[in-house]
Amino acid sequence: MKHNKFVRRYLRLFGQYFLQYCKVRLEYRGDLIVSIATTLVATGLGLALVFILFNRNQPVAGWSLDEILFLYGFGLVPLALFNTISVNLYYFGQLYIIEGKFDRVLLRPVHSLFQVMSEQFRLESLSDALVGVALIIYAGLRLDLSFSAIAIAAGIGAAACGFAIYFAVFLLLTCVSFWVEDRVGIIPPIYNLLAFGRYPLDIYNPAIKVFLSWVVPFGFAAFYPSAKFLGHDEYARYFLAMPLVAAAFLVAAVVLWNRGVNNYSSTGS
């Protein structure tokens, strides 16, 4: 009972935070529209690169163009959800540690991580999720994939695990700021690796494939679930391991965050 009340409370608070931020952004609709357009252009350029690289008559590493489009689209969904709430992770070291905003967070009777994640959103990133769904449907129809209720439920679950993996990896990197004060941090170079996970891992050498599977597990966020849905049965065991990978990294990230909070020293300003 207490657990249910706890979850309901935080879901309600998150909804209130999100709606309030939406109201603030809608006060400047022109800025929001420009941001959405910019995001769509960037996504369109990435998609154009896919056509340039893989638009051949022969499959690349056993993957056809339609399969790669499905993978690209599926990868956009969890990434878009992550980008929507990840703004404060990216700037955590500068805004919360160096500039002292974390002191204010610790004074409130709500978990510090929840507050940091709920104070700002990148609403324009949600447009990428719509593009991703459109690509999934387009490529899925061309590949004669099943869109049954079970398949859709499995896809939603896989996207949720992908979101959890992205969140956990970058939360782990963010926690470094509790011990090493750095305005930029180590997130930007790892963030650039996200693009690698939206292409078939089969095109990379074995070392990169292992790195993107078990060190920085972006492959579990997009490639392995897509491979399962597309009938690449050689990756079925990786698909089954996806929830375990997401849970393990997420638990590790939250534990490290709590230790970082205990290690935090106020700026005194």
Image: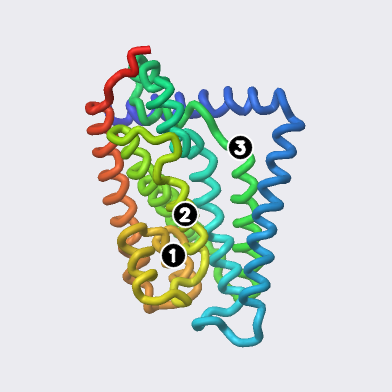
Instruction: Check disc 3 and report the residue beneath it.
Output: 123
Q: Is residue 266 above or below residue 118?
A: above
Q: Residue at x 64, y 51 (%)?
A: 130
In the rendered structure, are the residues bearing label 1 and label 2 in contact, judged by CB atoms less than 8 Å apart?
yes
Task: Tell me, yes or no, if residue 109 can be seen here.
Answer: no
Give the amino acid at mark 2. Answer: Ala
Query: Which marked residue is nearer to the observer: mark 3 or mark 1?
Result: 3
Q: Residues within 10 Å of mark 2 (few under 14, many from 20)?
A: many
Horizontally, is 202 left or right of 83 in the view?
Answer: left
Q: Is residue 49 above or below residue 17?
A: below
Marks 3 and 1 sit apart, C-alpha to C-alpha, by 26 Å
Give the amino acid at mark 1. Answer: Pro
Q: Residues within 10 Å of mark 3 (few under 14, many from 20)?
A: some
Q: Residue at x 31, y 62 (%)?
A: 214
Q: Residues within 10 Å of mark 1 (few under 14, many from 20)?
A: many
Query: Which marked residue is nearer to the observer: mark 3 or mark 2?
Result: 3
- Please, what secondary structure does the residue beneath circle 2 have? helix
In the rendered structure, are the residues bearing label 3 and label 2 in contact, judged by CB atoms less than 8 Å apart?
no
Give the amino acid at mark 3. Answer: Leu
Q: Nearer the viewer, residue 3 or 259?
A: 259
First reached walking from the N terminus: tag 3 or tag 1: 3
Instruction: Check disc 2 and report the residue beneath it.
Output: 159
- Please, what secondary structure does the residue beneath circle 3 have? helix
Q: Which of the numbered marks, if any, corresponds to residue 225?
A: 1
